[in-house]
Image (cartoon, rainbow, N blue to C red):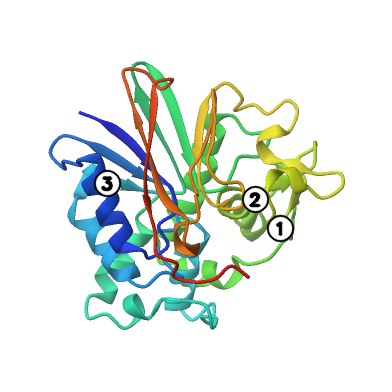
Amino acid sequence: MALYCIGDIQGCDSALERLLDTIGFSASRDTVYLLGDLVNRGPDSAAVLRRCARHGDAIRCLLGNHDLHLLAAAHGARKPSRRDTLASVLDAPDRNALLDWLQQQPLARTHAHAGQPLLMVHAGVVPDWTAADTLARAQEVNAVLRSPDLPAFLHTMYGNTPDRWSDTLTGTDRLRVIVNVLTRMRFCSPEGVMDFESTEGASAAPAGLMPWFEAPGRRTAGTLTAFGHWSTLGWLNRSDLLGLDTGCVWGGCLSAVRFGATLAERELLQVHCEQAQAPG
């Protein structure tokens, strides 16, 4: 059995198919984790969701900001923008089944491999959270996504405040911060105050900010954390970090990591992608 992580797909189903062929994926043998942003901007989001759903537990997914945006659009909480390509899902005959499947997916996952923990999120983790905290906070949101409260929650999900986690947060503010941490964050202050404006690479951090994974005292340091979301960061491979958004939808690559006998043994496998949209 082989273990893989794959970065942002964003509706590029043909690239996903080619990458699965490249890695020799077998649903009966292998486990693949997709790190969020399954849909949007690319040409066939519905096909991506169908492919994931039919493979059952062999392909395990996270929710990213674009996946939540699809749910918000489906429930009338957000209007699709001119750059969105969500119609293949919203107008699909199996729309309800696809959306029901999507809202069952978590915002964070862990996997034990050779006795070592792998933590997976779409965007990042604030410095205050341990891996266990991350899973617990994600579960708070997942419980709402899977409940009758979903439409009401989606109407209040968007916003940049509060911009810092606190254990004292409650209600909508608490859930919004959790969503922003796990699906939107790139930069933060040393104290964990998040920024949502800059989408540049790590070397272009705004004044007083740093990539979330450089925050001093980060409590997930030492736990291998795989994430996507940050195409201008690109491929990042450190002892305790894996960044896997390599800009497939922008004409970059779709990337997978195959783990060996331990999490430290890693092989990068990529397919080049046709540009679905121009950055901007």
| For the residues bearing labels 2 and 1, Cβ distance under 8 angstroms | yes
The front one of 108 and 261 is 261
- Asked if one can make out residue 101 in the rendered structure from this viewpoint, the answer is no
On the rendered structure, is 53 left or right of 128? left
On the rendered structure, is 62 left or right of 82? left
Residue to which mark 3 is pinned: 59
For the N terminus, the quadrant is top left
What's the residue type where badge 1 is placed? Phe
- Whole-angstrom CA distance, mark 3 to mark 2, is 25 Å
Residue 141 in picture, x, y percent from top left: 50, 53
Q: Which of the two discs, 3 and 2, labels the residue nearer the N terminus?
A: 3
Residue at (28, 62) in percent of width and height: 14
Residue to which mark 1 is pinned: 196
Please determine whether, in this image, residue 37 is positioned above or below residue 218: below
Residue situated furthest right in the rendering: 207
Residue 114 in picture, x, y percent from top left: 33, 17
What's the residue type where badge 2 is placed? Met
Which disc number belongs to residue 185? 2
Residue at (53, 24) in percent of width and height: 223
What's the residue type where badge 3 is placed? Ile
On the rendered structure, is 50 left or right of 170? left
